[in-house]
Amino acid sequence: MEIDRRIYFIMDKMKQFSKKKPEFICGEFPPKWNPPLKEQVVKQYEKENGILLPQDYRRFIITVADGGTQPFYGLYPLMGKLPSYEKRAAVYKKFPYIIRTPLNIAKLSEEAYHALFETQEADAGYILLCQEGCGMRSILIVNTEDKETYGTVWFYDLCNDAGIYPLVHPITHQTMSFLDWLEYYVDKTLELEDSDFFSYGELAGRIDEVN
């Protein structure tokens, strides 16, 4: 299975983390991983929410781990307890944006800006992946009418009045799947000096480069 081979390849590269001692870390490093979920548990979750999880993410959480201590403050579990400052989105509702029209807060009227936070309309159709700090999150879109948007990872930053934008890989110029997102973290961690760090925000919002 192609997904399994790619997961193995990514996790194998991660073994090289033993050589790294990054100065700026949030969660425990090298990563520690939670046990994977049972297939039946995931099926029940999908049934209850009327969704199908993206295949690469789904395969990861049932064969490798349902969360862990990295990236950043850690990969959140599908259903397990979250930190007190986090909340889950309404995954049974549709995500309101697509990769061609993300949420740019700077372009909102004052009325639309206040409505965004009052109605919480943006908190739908996605799964929280992780937080980098200061409210900057990675999210995985699992419920949308748009085929291009489904299964893509976005940068969610309302705390800093930035917006919600898809991540675009700097080499392929394509939107990123869960495994793209995870592999980018591994490659970037191995590439950087221990005194350096990165943010997924560096890849956010470059819609003009999506083919």
Image: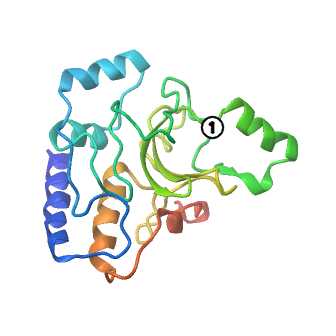
Scheme by which the image is coloured:
rainbow
Q: Quadrant of residue 195?
A: bottom left
Q: Label 1, secondary structure: give it.
A: loop
Query: Crowding near pointer 1: few (<14 within 10 Å), some, many (20+)?
Result: many
Q: Please give the name of the residue rendered at 25% of the width and 39% of the height, measured from the top-left corner.
A: 66
Which residue is depicted at the point 59% across and 44% down? 98
User: Where 35 falls versus 136 (above or below)?
Assistant: above
Amino acid type at circle 1 is Ala
The quarter of the rendered structure image containing the N terminus is top left
Whole-percent x, y for residue 206 in the image: 58, 64
In the orientation shown, which residue stands out farthest toward the front? Answer: 84
* Residue 104: x %, y % from top left: 70, 53
- State left or right for residue 187 relative to residue 90: left
The residue tagged 1 is 122
The spot of residue 13 in percent (x, y) is 17, 66
**Residue 38: x %, y % from top left:** 17, 27
Furthest toward the right, the residue is 110
Q: How many marks?
A: 1
* Of 161 and 7, the residue lying toward us: 161
Q: In this view, does 50 lie to the left or right of 123?
A: left
> Is residue 192 depicted above or below 14 in this figure?
below
Going 28% across and 66% down the picture, which residue do you hit? 186
The answer to whether 143 is drawn above or below residue 172 in the figure is above
- Above-or-below relation of 148 to 198: above
